[in-house]
Image (tube, rainbow, N blue to C red):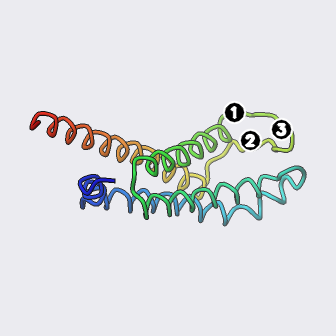
């Protein structure tokens, strides 16, 4: 990695963006951990909804840590995929009655409540901001390559 790439990643604006995305992923993880026990009671067979919540929470924490420490385009992409996939899942669970798929239970829950709303907002915002961070690093990388090729 070149020094300029590392400098771009650690620009003050991108550091703030990373911290906000990490906060969104942590909110998502904490709420999923809090709700996991109740969802296991609702569907104890198969993988169980509670276990899916725990898995999602761990993946969100790992991606948050990866983004916080590394701050690369790849880490923004991982954060975007994790946040937006969770956002899509919460929307599907609210509006679409999917049947159980193998060991994965039906997650249909046609209501909004405070924790569900908070996690949906955190996931959606985190995903959109992660795409923005990815684009910002892509754009600044291509701009510096263009500038260096003009100098040559």
Image quadrant for the C terminus? top left
C-beta proximity under 8 Å, tags 1 and 3: no
Above or below residue 85? Residue 2 is below
> Of label 2 and label 1, which has the lower sequence position?
1
Percent x, y of residue 45: 90, 52
The residue nearer to you, when weighing 127 against 113, is 127
**Residue at image x 52%, y 63%?**
26
Label 3 or label 2, whichever lies nearer to me, is 3
Above or below residue 111? Residue 57 is below
Direction front: furthest residue: 152
For label 3, the crowd category at 10 Å Cα-Cα, with few meaning under 14, some 14 to 19 and many 20 or more, is: few
Mark count? 3
On screen, residue 99 versus residue 118, left or right, reads right
| Distance of label 2 from label 1 (alpha carbons) | 7 Å
**Residue at image x 81%, y 34%?**
99
Q: Secondary structure at mark 3?
A: loop
For label 1, the crowd category at 10 Å Cα-Cα, with few meaning under 14, some 14 to 19 and many 20 or more, is: some
- Which residue carries the number 3 mark? 100
- Which residue carries the number 2 mark? 108
Above or below residue 58? Residue 145 is above
- Which residue carries the number 1 mark? 96
Direction right: furthest residue: 45
Percent x, y of residue 117: 55, 52
| Distance of label 1 from label 3 (alpha carbons) | 12 Å
Percent x, y of residue 59: 62, 56
Q: Secondary structure at mark 2?
A: loop
**Residue at image x 56%, y 48%?**
82
C-beta proximity under 8 Å, tags 2 and 1: yes
């Amino acid at each position: 990695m070149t020094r300029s790439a590392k400098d771009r990643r650690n620009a003050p604006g991108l550091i703030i963006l990373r911290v906000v995305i990490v906060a969104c992923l942590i909110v998502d993880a904490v709420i999923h951990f809090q709700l996991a026990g109740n969802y296991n009671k609702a569907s104890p067979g198969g993988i169980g909804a509670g276990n899916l919540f725990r898995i999602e929470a761990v993946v969100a924490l790992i991606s948050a840590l990866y983004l916080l420490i590394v701050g690369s385009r790849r880490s923004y992409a991982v954060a975007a995929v994790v946040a937006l996939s969770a956002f899509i899942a919460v929307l599907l669970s609210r509006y679409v009655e999917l049947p159980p798929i193998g060991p994965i239970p039906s997650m249909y829950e046609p209501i909004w409540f405070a924790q569900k709303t908070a996690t949906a907002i955190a996931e959606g915002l985190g995903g959109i901001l992660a795409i923005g961070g990815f684009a910002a690093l892509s754009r600044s990388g291509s701009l510096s390559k263009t500038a260096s090729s003009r100098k040559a």
